[in-house]
Amino acid sequence: MNFFQQPLSLGALTLSNRVLLAPLAGVSDVPFRRICQELGAGLTYVEMLSAVAIHHKNKRTVDMCKRHPSEDVLGVQVTGPSPELVEQAVRILNEGSFDTIDLNMGCSVRKVIAGGAGSGILSEPERISATVRAARQATALPLSVKTRLGVSRNAISIEDTARRLAREGADMITVHGRTRDEKYGAPADREGIRRGLAAAREAAIRPLVTVGNGDLFDWASVRAMREQTACDAVMISRGALGNPWIFREVLEERTVHPTLEEWGDVVLRHLDYQEQHYGDTELAAIMARKHLLWYIKGYPCNKELGAHVGYVKRIEEGRLHIKEYLAQWPGDLVRFEGAHKTESRFGPNSKYDPKYEMHRQHDRGVGEE
Ligand SMILES: Cc1cc2nc3c(=O)[nH]c(=O)nc-3n(C[C@H](O)[C@H](O)[C@H](O)COP(=O)(O)O)c2cc1C
């Protein structure tokens, strides 16, 4: 069995493999999570929720907590400005339908940091310890933390952070190999991840799962992450946008791109799930647009198709464009082969941050009350 196919114990939970989908604000809703699970993701998460919004039972936040019966395993992520608020939120989430809870200590979005949440905590080591301690008391579910290397290159704190998380009883630690100030502007630093994960392992008071994150776009980058950081698992983020086949690729440990026929099946299924979840509404279509634009990358004449799918007002409209496109090209056409090749916007040196492309109106971001 390949390394990434091996089951993984996370507290009392057993994950079917070691390739996880990150919480992705505005992206990791029920339809996308279902697709990623079907293509092999061993764990998926609800996007980051604000402890304050959970406390106020904000309707959008409650909606985001919905779980589909087909979801075998589901995590949720929360962030908050104080240990007390995080503890309260964890108590509430503990009663929800989640298998594991993650604390976000890495988000670099300005409004989140301004509220003292996300990576805003990284310059307050004592608050890091107090937050995990408080959350640990509030749940017996597997508890994890996702964090960055530090605030800036001059303030790399990952080893201290990791030790604190491990000492307070975290079951899993995910390190995104960038600092808060770098956002996406520098390649993920695998040596920094390795140091953080090693420090966590040394300080752990219980079995600890270590996870590498950052610039995982294909089997080659995942293999490099495993080799250079000795992580137990990987967490895929931008690499899954428009490419949920990345889970299959990593599990099979080889480069695989879908044929147009396989692609069409998944894209149409994603649209079905979108409609099931959001209803036959304009919102369903708006939420689908960005996925459709990501999906069409790597196929010929995708600009023309993009001009249509980027503006669909109903899911049915999206279906028709995709079906028309499928009828024009051979089913065995392989993605990224043939006529069309583009520089990946998501490549390791790309400054492109899809977060800024989200429709603000529908950005299921955090920090709202
Ligand atoms: C659209 C988008 C939304 C994100 N939302 C979250 C989130 O809700 N929680 C979180 O911990 N990280 C979030 N992230 C950060 C990613 O999980 C990940 O740490 C980061 O993108 C680095 O990995 P990558 O270089 O492979 O994309 C988000 C990233 C993107 C692009």
Image: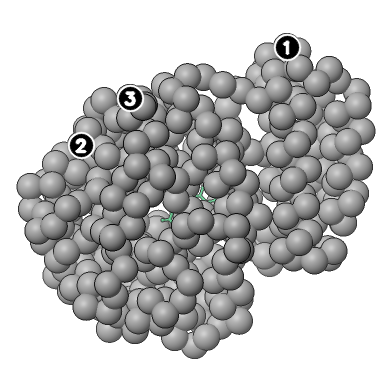
Q: Earlier in the sequence, mark 1 or mark 2?
A: 2
Label annotation for residue 338: 1
Give left or right: position of 36 versus 142: right
* Within-10-Å neighbours for mark 2: few <14, some 14–19, many 20+: many
Q: Residue furthest top?
A: 338
Q: Earlier in the sequence, mark 2 or mark 3?
A: 2
Q: Quadrant of residue 105?
A: bottom left
Q: Name the residue at 38% across, 69% down.
A: 79
Give left or right: position of 225 versus 261: left
Q: Which type of secondary structure does the marked residue at label 2 adopt?
A: helix
Give coordinates of residue 55: x percent, y percent: 44, 86
Q: Which type of secondary structure does the marked residue at label 3 adopt?
A: helix
Give amino acid for label 1: Gly
Give amino acid for label 2: Arg
Label annotation for residue 194: 2
Give yes or no for contact between labels 3 and 1 (Cβ–Cβ under 8 Å): no
How much space separates mark 3 and mark 1, taking CA atoms? 28 Å
How much space separates mark 1 and mark 2, taking CA atoms? 38 Å
Give yes or no for contact between labels 2 and 3 (Cβ–Cβ under 8 Å): no
Give yes or no for contact between labels 1 and 2 (Cβ–Cβ under 8 Å): no
